[in-house]
Image (cartoon, coloured by chain):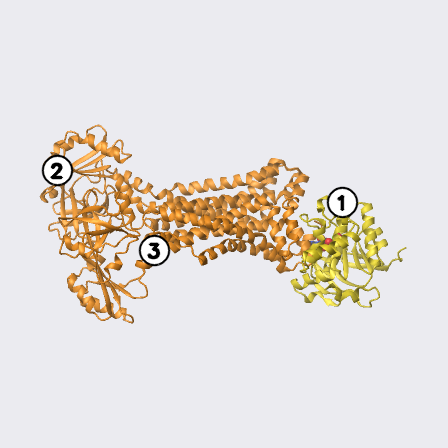
Chain colours: A yellow, B orange
């Protein structure tokens, strides 16, 4: 079911994978997003930077369909998320996006393999098939030997790689990362960065929120700088070495 | 840090946990009500008699002597014998015969005692209910066995006893007389006996009473004592009805207490456990361990105290009517059947204490926790519990949402066990109630129910007690008229008389059924109906109290004629002082049929109103109306009790589930947010959450239903005013069991649904924000 969208994930696709127009988000009186316009094309790797509280995570949540804007439209792969109900959003997340977080958000009660398999099992894939694909992914990410270990016993870097595997389980068109290295020591951070670069190189569209300039410059092809809920500056980055 | 800070922190904690605070309050409320009701009935069973009896300085023994064998002086001297605490008498005692039924009592003997010191004597001070004491010739005060008296009877002649006018109604707990006149009046009525009233220093058992009486009457001629009525027998008869409810109340009361303790413990400890993170924060800003415990105790005490107060008020309000029902139809005399005054005090003290205790254990754990430990302990259940099960479940073919739900209870085994115990108790309650109702429906079915036919119930004016008009027709004429009036198909009669049984110290009521459907009226659950002459049937309480069994014979004295009757059948239920027999047996004693009621079965399609009008035209003194299904007071009360308790306990159990699910969701909201972020739909969230407790519900059914069946059997076999045959106890058909199996799941799902839906609507972004 994840194959229908393969056309849009190719780097040469002209269509925008993400398209935000005039997106506002208010929490009570506080304005978290104040008129965001942003397009991300297939195969791009976009980094969003800015001071704490400027609205980066809020922006990411809009794109992931985890929250709804107060005003404006969010389109992902041409689909207007405002037209989806809760179930529709859930199915959208399942099919089209994968997310990784600063604090991994793994389920403590399940070993690495089952944490990864979970994402496919929710769609009705059998346990056996889901585990097989999960093992493949863990292998690709270099943590297959830790498949039976519970999150509490994994290192930070290992946890984040398991989280990446889970995010990739359903072959999402878009991978979203919110401060993916924020809770990691520098060595583990490097490894996760390398992983993201590799993924982008095989065509995975990325949207990364960070305030680590190193992460932004190494992984992204474009940098979006935010301040006070607005896009302050946008520039292309040097191609990676 | 000041006490003000502790109080402010507690208040903030309550405010942040509005829902949980509300649940604690509600659980405590329902539990308090349940416990209060159960205690009210249990404690009311005997205490009211003792109270009223003591207030009247009741006679432990009411003795009658033959004046031909013992003189008044000899009897007066018995008052000073050792062991006699107080005595009064002798009073002249005469028996008059009331030829008609009057104020609900059947025709029969009425014992009149000549006494003047009724209000202030050393023993037996009847309470004057209306009018005044008899002070002059021709005046009589009637002993009224129930509270309340008919105003219109005051100042009227005593029916059938020439020369006596009713000037008052009084009530004696000692049942020392049917009425009182002046000693002169009594002497004029040709007294056949002398009455002595005794209180003994030692009156705890039947044997001691006998010993006391023997000591008092020592030296008197052997057969001078003609009867000695013990107050213990009266007390037993008084509480017989309420005693019948004791097994039920004990079972429900115990269930209620257990459920209350379990849920309160679970809810409160859950509140503390889920507050660990908060505790860590408090400690890190400088709260001492003791202050933290105080914050938590305060947090649960506020709703607990409010819940206790409201629950006590609700229980108190319900206790009155429920007790009234339990004691309806009992000769209460002046005993005030009301919930004991100490009950609210007890619940007001004990319930908050219980809550505090339930909170103290986890709160003292919080006491020991270091700040960082607490912060990390609060976020999620510790990994490592039930992991094998989770692992296995994730490999099954079940939908993932379901298998995740199934695994959840293993993460918090203690909480799951407590929750399940509450559901189990809920299932037991529902099972017991369902069983009882089925049993009672079967019991009422064959004889109490009137089937599809319409019945008209006709009473004589005297019996109905609201007619002054004299009857126009004799019983025979009435029966013939009822047959002849268009629409009648079958006519049955019930006669009622008061009689004496040799060896019993109180008169009994004897019913005679006759007419077309007499056989149906003589319905028994053991032995056979007393349809033949010389046969009688009685209820289980009658057999119990007199130590009789089927096949035994009793000697009955009715209107001066004695007959030996054989007890051939045991009725489902019956008054301790009632014998049922047929009109054929009545004919052995007397020509007077004593008919007080007629039951007329109408032909299909007959006009009941027209029939009733025709009956009233024929004899205006008759009272006729359409008969309703005759559910007896015990049946109604048992059903009412069990329904109230079932509702309360089910609510409490469902609240327990509600609370557990709420806590689980709160603790797992990060996992939940993550699951939703990877595409779990709202329906899957509900399915997962409901599954997590529904299977506890299934398990509870497996444990609770057999336990409930057992409890039902215990109750039905021990309710001694009803003798249920096996066919009525074994009510468990497959459909009923299947229905009950759903009870546990229903309680669980009911409690889980609301939090499950709120979980499905949880805003993920908020949950995942920098946890
Ligand atoms: N669920 C929420 N409720 C209230 N305010 C929020 C919520 N989420 C974000 N905010 C506010 O919106 C602003 C932007 O937050 P966020 O997007 O998390 O910032 P960033 O990720 O750039 O640090 C902040 O001021 C934050 O306090
Ligand atoms: Mg952020």
Q: Is residue B66 left or right of residue B356?
A: left
Provide the chain ID for the residue under circle 2: B
Disc 1, SS: loop
Q: Nearer the viewer, residue B139 or B189?
A: B189
Closer to us: mark 1 or mark 2? 1
Q: Measured along the vertical axis of the image, is residue B479 above or below residue B497?
A: below
Please identify the residue farthest to the right as the structure is shown: A241
Judging by the rendered image, the residue that carries numbered circle 2 is B66
Label 3 packing within 10 angstroms: few (<14), some (14-19), many (20+) = many
Is the residue at mark 1 in contact range of ligand 2, meaning its CB lies under 8 Å from it?
no
Q: Nearer the viewer, residue A30 or A175?
A: A175
The chain letter under disc 3 is B
Residue hosting label 1: A155
Q: Chain of mark 1?
A: A
**Percent x, y of residue B733:** 43, 57
On the same chain, marks 1 and 2? The answer is: no
In the rendering, at what x and y percent does residue B26 appear?
Answer: 50, 49
Name the one closer to the observer, B524 or B745: B524
Label disc, if present, on residue B280 of the rendered structure = none
Could you tell me residue B134's position as x and y percent?
16, 45
Residue B516 located left or right of residue A135: left
Q: Which residue is mark 3?
A: B443
Residue B131 in view, yes or no: no
Distance from the alpha carbon under mark 1 to that under mark 2: 104 Å
Q: Quadrant of the N terminus of chain B?
A: top right
Which mark is nearer the camera, 3 or 1? Answer: 3
Distance between the Cα atoms at labels 2 and 3? Answer: 47 Å
Whole-angstrom CA distance, mark 3 to mark 1, is 71 Å
Q: Is residue A73 left or right of residue B477?
A: right
State yes or no: Cβ of the residue under disc 2 lies below 8 Å from any atom of ligand 1.
Answer: no
């Amino acid at each position: 079911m994840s194959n229908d969208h393969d056309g849009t994930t190719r780097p040469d696709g002209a269509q925008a994978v993400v398209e935000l127009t005039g997106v506002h988000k208010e929490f009570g009186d506080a304005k978290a997003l104040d008129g965001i316009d942003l397009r991300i094309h297939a195969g791009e790797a976009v980094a969003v930077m800015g001071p704490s509280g400027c609205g980066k995570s809020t922006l990411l949540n809009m794109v992931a369909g985890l929250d709804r804007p107060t005003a404006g439209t969010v389109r992902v792969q041409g689909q207007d998320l405002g037209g989806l109900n809760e179930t529709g959003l859930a199915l959208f997340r399942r099919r089209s996006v994968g997310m990784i977080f600063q604090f991994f958000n793994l389920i403590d009660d399940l070993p690495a393999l089952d944490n990864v398999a979970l994402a496919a099992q929710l769609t009705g894939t059998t346990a056996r098939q889901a585990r097989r694909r999960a093992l493949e992914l863990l292998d690709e990410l270099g943590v297959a030997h830790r498949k039976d270990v519970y999150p509490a016993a994994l290192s930070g870097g290992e946890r984040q790689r398991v989280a990446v595997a889970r995010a990739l389980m359903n072959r999402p068109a878009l991978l979203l990362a919110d401060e993916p290295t924020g809770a990691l020591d520098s060595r583990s951070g490097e490894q996760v960065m390398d992983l993201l670069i590799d993924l982008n190189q095989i065509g995975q569209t990325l949207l990364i929120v960070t305030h680590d300039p190193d992460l932004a410059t190494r992984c992204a092809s474009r940098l979006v700088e935010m301040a006070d809920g607005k896009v302050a500056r946008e520039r292309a980055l040097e191609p990676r070495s | 840090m000041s006490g003000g800070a502790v109080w402010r922190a507690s208040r903030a904690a309550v405010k942040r946990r509005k829902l949980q605070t509300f649940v604690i309050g509600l659980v405590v409320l329902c539990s308090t009500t349940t416990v209060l009701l159960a205690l009210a009935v249990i404690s009311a069973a005997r205490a009211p008699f003792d109270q009223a009896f003591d207030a009247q300085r009741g006679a432990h023994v009411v003795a009658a002597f033959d004046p031909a064998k013992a003189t008044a002086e000899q009897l007066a001297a018995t008052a000073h014998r050792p062991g006699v605490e107080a005595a009064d008498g002798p009073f002249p005692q005469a028996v008059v015969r009331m030829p008609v039924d009057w104020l609900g009592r059947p025709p029969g003997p009425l014992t009149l005692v000549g006494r003047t010191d009724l209000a202030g004597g050393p023993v037996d001070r009847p309470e004057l209910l209306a009018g005044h004491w008899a002070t002059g010739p021709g005046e009589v005060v009637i002993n009224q066995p129930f509270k309340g008296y008919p105003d219109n009877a005051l100042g009227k002649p005593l029916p059938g006893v020439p020369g006596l006018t009713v000037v008052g109604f009084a009530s004696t707990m000692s049942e020392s007389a049917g009425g009182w006149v002046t000693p002169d009046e009594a002497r004029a009525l040709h007294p056949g006996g002398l009455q002595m009233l005794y209180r003994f220093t030692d009156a705890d058992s039947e044997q001691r009473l006998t010993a006391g009486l023997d000591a008092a009457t020592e030296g008197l001629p052997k057969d001078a004592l003609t009867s000695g009525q013990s107050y213990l027998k009266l007390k037993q008869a008084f509480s017989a009805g309420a005693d019948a409810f004791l097994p039920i109340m004990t079972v429900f009361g115990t269930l209620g207490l257990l459920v209350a303790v379990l849920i309160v413990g679970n809810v409160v400890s859950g509140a503390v456990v889920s507050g660990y993170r908060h505790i860590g924060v408090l400690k890190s800003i400088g709260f001492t361990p003791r202050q933290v415990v105080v914050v938590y105790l305060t947090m649960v005490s506020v709703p607990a105290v409010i819940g206790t107060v409201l629950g006590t008020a609700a229980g108190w309000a319900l206790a009155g009517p429920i007790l009234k029902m339990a004691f309806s139809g009992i000769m209460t005399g002046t005993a005030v059947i009301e919930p004991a005054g100490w009950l609210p005090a007890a619940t007001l003290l004990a319930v908050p204490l219980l809550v505090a205790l339930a909170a103290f254990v986890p709160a003292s754990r919080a006491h020991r926790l270091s700040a960082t430990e607490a912060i990390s302990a609060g976020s999620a259940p510790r990994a490592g519990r039930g992991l094998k099960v989770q692992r296995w479940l994730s490999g099954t073919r079940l939908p993932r949402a379901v298998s995740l739900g199934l695994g959840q209870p293993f993460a918090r085994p203690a909480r799951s066990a407590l929750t399940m115990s509450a559901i189990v108790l809920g299932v037991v309650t529902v099972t017991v109630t369902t069983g009882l109702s089925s049993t009672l429906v079967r019991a009422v079915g064959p004889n109490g129910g009137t089937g599809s036919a319409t019945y008209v119930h006709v009473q004589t004016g005297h019996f109905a007690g609201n007619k002054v008009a004299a009857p126009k027709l004799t019983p025979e004429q009435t029966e013939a008229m009822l047959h002849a009036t268009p629409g009648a198909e079958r006519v049955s009669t019930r006669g009622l008389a008061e009689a004496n049984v040799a060896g019993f110290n109180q008169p009994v009521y004897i019913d005679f059924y006759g007419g077309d459907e007499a056989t149906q009226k003589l319905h028994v659950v053991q032995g056979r109906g007393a349809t033949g002459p010389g046969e009688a049937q009685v209820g289980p309480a009658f057999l119990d109290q007199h130590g009789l069994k089927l096949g035994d014979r009793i000697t009955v004295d009715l209107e001066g004629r004695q007959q030996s009757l054989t007890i051939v059948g045991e009725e489902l239920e019956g008054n301790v002082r009632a014998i049922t027999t047929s009109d054929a047996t009545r004919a052995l004693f007397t020509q007077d049929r004593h008919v007080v009621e007629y039951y007329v079965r109408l032909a299909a399609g007959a006009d009941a109103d027209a029939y009733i009008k025709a009956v009233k035209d024929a004899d205006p003194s008759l009272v006729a109306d359409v008969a309703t299904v005759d559910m007896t007071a015990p049946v109604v009360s048992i059903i009412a009790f069990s329904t109230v308790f079932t509702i309360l306990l089910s609510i409490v159990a469902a609240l327990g589930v509600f609370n557990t699910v709420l806590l689980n969701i709160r603790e797992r909201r990060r996992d939940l947010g993550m699951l939703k972020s990877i595409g779990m739909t709202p329906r899957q969230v509900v399915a997962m959450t409901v599954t997590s407790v529904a299977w506890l519900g299934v398990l509870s059914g497996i444990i609770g239903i057999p336990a409930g069946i057992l409890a039902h059997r215990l109750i039905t076999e021990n309710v001694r005013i009803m003798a249920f045959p096996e066919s009525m106890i074994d009510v468990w058909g497959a459909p009923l069991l299947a229905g009950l199996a759903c009870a546990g799941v229903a309680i669980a799902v009911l409690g889980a649904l609301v939090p499950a839906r709120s979980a499905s609507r949880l805003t993920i972004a908020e949950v995942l924000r920098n946890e």
